[in-house]
Amino acid sequence: MNLVFLGPPGSGKGTQAAKLSEKLGLVHLSTGDMLREAVKRASELGRKAEEYMKRGELVPDDLIIGLIQDKLRDGELDGGFILDGFPRTIPQAEGLKQMLENNDINLYKAILFQVDDEEVVRRLSGRWYCPQCSAGYNYPAQMPRVEGRCDNDDTELQRRPDDEESVVRNRLKVYLKQTKPIEDFYRGESILTEVPAQQPPEKVFEALVKEVSSQV
Ligand code: AMP
């Protein structure tokens, strides 16, 4: 099964993609995670991407499309995948369509996680993560046992620099302008489905599993 997850930053795409990919044995591909890793390694891609990411802008399409193309070419996506955070522009959606057609791969569904803007700002300003094991926390709903330390390995928790409120507001603007049009793109392909994501993560997961259940 091959899925695309759509939705504004903070809509829970990443959390849900991690859970669903584990349940169904799919590869979870987050372009945001790949880029953050590249920035950490200070690779050529990381150096090119960093300034865009800091401002909450999108990294140029050709860099991102190249990343996905490499994964497809290496056969890493052959067993089924969830794309989380890609595509994010119409040229990316068109690029993906072309790449999948060339490899005889079908998309099953594009799943849109629905939350409103104020909820996004609230969620992201309370988001913390462990740089060691990647565990995520959300203040005040999901606090670690000891404030500021990871429950798994006691590492000091960090915030993503682009979760600062002014950057979050810019990411939302970018989403509305550049990413939202993709909803219509997938509506046109008759594979868009919506999951209400302004509810506790377990409820969102239930709704998500129902959405994909005809294939489970
Ligand atoms: P995310 O973790 O998905 O919120 O992504 C964090 C940042 O990485 C975004 O604000 C963009 O700067 C960049 N990014 C991630 N995915 C893409 C994409 N598909 N196209 C362009 N930029 C991206």
Image (cartoon, rainbow, N blue to C red):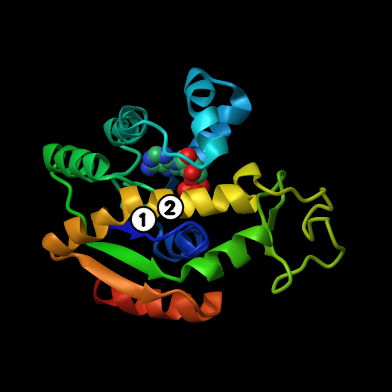
Q: Inspect this view and state whether residue 84 appears.
A: no
At label 1, which amino acid type do we have?
Leu
Q: Position of residue 34 (x, y in %)?
A: 49, 37
Q: Residue at x 25, y 60 (%)?
A: 183
Q: Is 86 situated above or below 210?
A: above
Q: Position of residue 150 (x, y in %)?
A: 79, 56
At label 2, which amino acid type do we have?
Lys
Q: Are marks 1 and 2 in contact (CB under 8 Å)?
A: yes
Q: Residue at x 33, y 29 (%)?
A: 70
For the residue carrying disc 1, how many other residues have a C-alpha within 10 Å: few (<14), some (14-19), or many (20+)? few
Which residue in the protein does label 2 denote? Answer: 173
The quadrant of the rendered image in which ligand 1 is seen is top left
- Image disc number at residue 125: none
Q: Inspect this view and state whether residue 43 appears.
A: yes
- Image disc number at residue 176: 1
Q: Which of these two is toward me, 118 or 100?
A: 118
Q: Secondary structure at mark 2?
A: helix
Q: Position of residue 11 (x, y in %)?
A: 48, 64
Q: Which of these two is toward me, 41 or 62?
A: 62
Task: Using the numbered discs, state the Cα–Cα distance from disc 1 to disc 2 in whole angstroms.
Answer: 5 Å
The quadrant of the image that shows the N terminus is bottom left
Q: Residue furthest top?
A: 44
Residue 210: quarter of image: bottom left
For the residue carrying disc 2, how many other residues have a C-alpha within 10 Å: few (<14), some (14-19), or many (20+)? some
Q: Is 210 situated above or below 103?
A: below
Q: Secondary structure at mark 1?
A: helix
